[in-house]
Image (cartoon, rainbow, N blue to C red):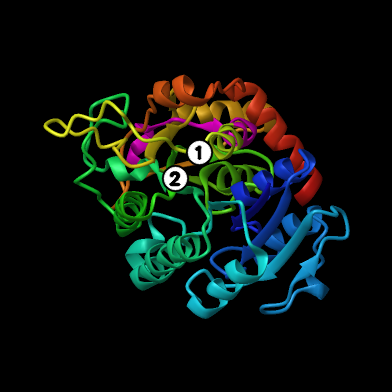
Amino acid sequence: MKILVTGTAGFIGYHLAKRLLEEGHEVVGIDNINDYYDVNLKYGRLRELGIEERDVSAGKRVKSRRYDGHAFYLMDLADTPAIERLFKEEKFDAVCNLAAQAGVRYSLENPMAYIRSNVTGFANILEGCRNHEVENLCYASSSSVYGLNKSMPFRVSDSVDHPVSLYAATKKGNELMAHTYSHLYGIRTTGLRFFTVYGPWGRPDMAPMLFADAILNDRPINVFNYGKMQRDFTYIDDIVEGVVKVIENPAKANEDFDFMHPDPASSPAPYRVYNIGNGKPVKLMDFILTLEKHLGKKAQMNMMPMQPGDVEATWADTSALERDVGYSPSTDLDRGIEKFIEWYRSYYL
């Protein structure tokens, strides 16, 4: 297939593009390479895909020096004319939209960045699919949509009507927008609610990178809610395996849809929403202990209260994704952290 992957300078987008290219697909990547975090890390990921920083300029099609089937555009998802031209010129078989303004806490500081990227940008992707007959779309949602829900594990049949950050609200908005386009235009859309993803080339604003950097440099780490947190940490290779399976198995209509008791994760239209996580929540303090083990160094800790927009625990029920596409995460925390620290030392030290 010829696949558009948005956000290929990002953590998950980079790993997905690499996997698809190694499987023989043609991949067109786009990213606006904003400065939300270190752009050198973003260009480092692109370099692994054969895209050199010196070749990149706005709107230019850059051919990979490593993969014959890869091209990259420096492009903003919210640039409506540019996205329309991209769809018209490239003619995709499938789209995986991973580009977004990420981060829960940053959404408290700069809310309009989330509207521009996550709402306007996603609308441009949907319009591109509609206008250019792309019927296979998967996109990143987030575990943050569960908001105030404390019923564990989180199930896709649960209500997600109480988000606690604008980031989460935009991700729920994506799911609603996707359903509308599935219903009106028959586009097969699959939303993936990512749970805490970690691994090589991870985001520096996320706990694994923040903690590793602080521990190695003798700085204290901020431990929110006094350490009483749980996260469904999921290793990047398991996430990518699930995304590839979804691309290869686009959404189908639920022929048994009950209009009197509607299932929020499916539809009589070709629309699905899935959790994608490890299904095994880890206590934050256990995560820190595992980092300490592989770093060979103890952490200094600032115990702090819960931050606005954050949630105490996440835990994914992934049974629907397991049933429908055979998703089966296999990397335990100890092995995942070991591989992450190996990469971290090779890249930063």
Would residue 10 be seen by someone viewing this image from the given angle? yes
Q: Is residue 238 above or below residue 8?
A: above
Kindly identify the residue that appears in the image at 68 percent across and 36 percent down: 340
Q: Amino acid at mark 2?
A: Arg
Q: Which residue is mark 2?
A: 188
Place of residue 234 in the rendered image (x, y in percent of width and height, measured from the top left):
53, 31
Relative side of 14 to 229, left or right = right
Report how far apart the C-alphas of labels 1 and 2 lie in the structure. 6 Å
State left or right for residue 207 relative to residue 107: right
- Which residue is rendered at x = 78% and y = 42% of the image? 24
Q: Is residue 226 magenta?
A: yes
Label pair 1/2, CB-CB below 8 angstroms? yes
Part of the protein shown in magenta: 225-241
What SS does tag 2 mark? strand
Front residue of 279/110: it is: 279
Q: Residue at x 71, y 43 (%)?
A: 20
Q: Residue 146, percent across and down? A: 28, 40
Query: Could you say whether the residue bearing mark 1 is in a helix, strand or loop?
Result: loop
Tell me which residue sits at (73%, 45%) in the image: 25
Q: Which mark is residue 250?
A: 1
